[in-house]
């Protein structure tokens, strides 16, 4: 787990037990007061081999993946890359950067130099983790605002029921295997 309560599952559980809510004033400029669950800083950068994709949403996804990387590798080893897949959720998927880029493009007809469509698309985290881990089964990224995390589990369940993937329940993870 990686969210406004902490950067690891242990930190999130500790925060929940301590009664913390993980909300803080929203770091985005909006014309009203708003609270957000922002992942605590610092968020580690992507490895150098993925530096061209270095944006916050992918760095957070990468951070969360580190907790399950061993379970994913084990599932790939045991069942083969075709039987391992992932359903990932994002509530915003880098939309703030995309909106900023759109407004700049609208004014100047050019995208800002730092804007990377491949890094800011909703599916970028799925492509990044799939290429890194080496699974070859289905990879979905669900972006349905606040319902994304719930939608991920229903989508994963359908994949499991269809037989496209197999599963194994780990301590912190729904890994895919038999």
Image: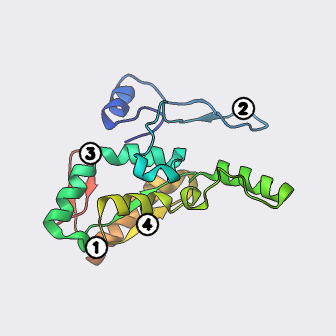
Q: Residues within 10 Å of mark 4 (few under 14, many from 20)?
A: some
Q: Left or right? Give the position of 63 relative to 58.
A: left
Query: Count of labels shown?
Result: 4
Q: Which residue is mark 1?
A: 161
Image coordinates of residue 41 in percent, x first then y, are: 49, 30
Say if 34 sits above or below 156 in the image. Answer: above
Dot placed on the residue nearer the N-terminal end, 3 or 4: 4
**Structural distance between the alpha carbons of marks 3 and 1:** 21 Å
- Asked which quadrant contains residue 8, the reply is top left
Q: Are marks 2 and 1 in contact (CB under 8 Å)?
A: no
Dot placed on the residue nearer the N-terminal end, 4 or 1: 4
Q: Which residue is mark 2?
A: 33
Dot placed on the residue nearer the N-terminal end, 3 or 1: 1
Image coordinates of residue 102 in percent, x first then y, are: 75, 57
Residue 172's disc is 3
Image coordinates of residue 26 in percent, x first then y, are: 64, 34
- Asked which quadrant contains residue 75, the reply is bottom left
Q: Residue at x 72, y 32 (%)?
A: 33
Tag 2 secondary structure: loop
Q: Residue at x 34, y 58 (%)?
A: 132
Q: Are marks 3 and 1 in contact (CB under 8 Å)?
A: no
């Amino acid at each position: 787990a990686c969210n406004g309560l902490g950067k690891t599952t242990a930190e999130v559980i500790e925060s929940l037990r301590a009664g913390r809510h993980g909300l803080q004033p929203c770091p985005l400029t909006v014309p009203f007061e708003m609270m957000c669950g922002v992942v605590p800083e610092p968020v580690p950068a992507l490895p150098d081999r993925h530096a061209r994709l270095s944006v916050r949403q992918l760095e957070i996804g990468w951070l969360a993946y580190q907790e399950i990387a061993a379970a994913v590798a084990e599932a790939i080893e045991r069942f083969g890359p075709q039987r391992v897949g992932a359903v990932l959720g994002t509530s915003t998927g880098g939309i703030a950067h995309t909106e900023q880029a759109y407004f700049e493009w609208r004014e100047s007809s050019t995208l800002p130099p730092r804007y990377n469509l491949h890094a800011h698309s909703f599916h970028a985290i799925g492509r990044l983790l799939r290429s890194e881990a080496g699974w070859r089964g289905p990879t979905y990224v669900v972006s349905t605002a606040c319902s994304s995390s719930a939608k991920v589990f229903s989508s994963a369940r359908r994949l499991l029921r269809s037989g496209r993937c197999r599963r194994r329940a780990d301590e912190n993870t729904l890994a895919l295997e038999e």
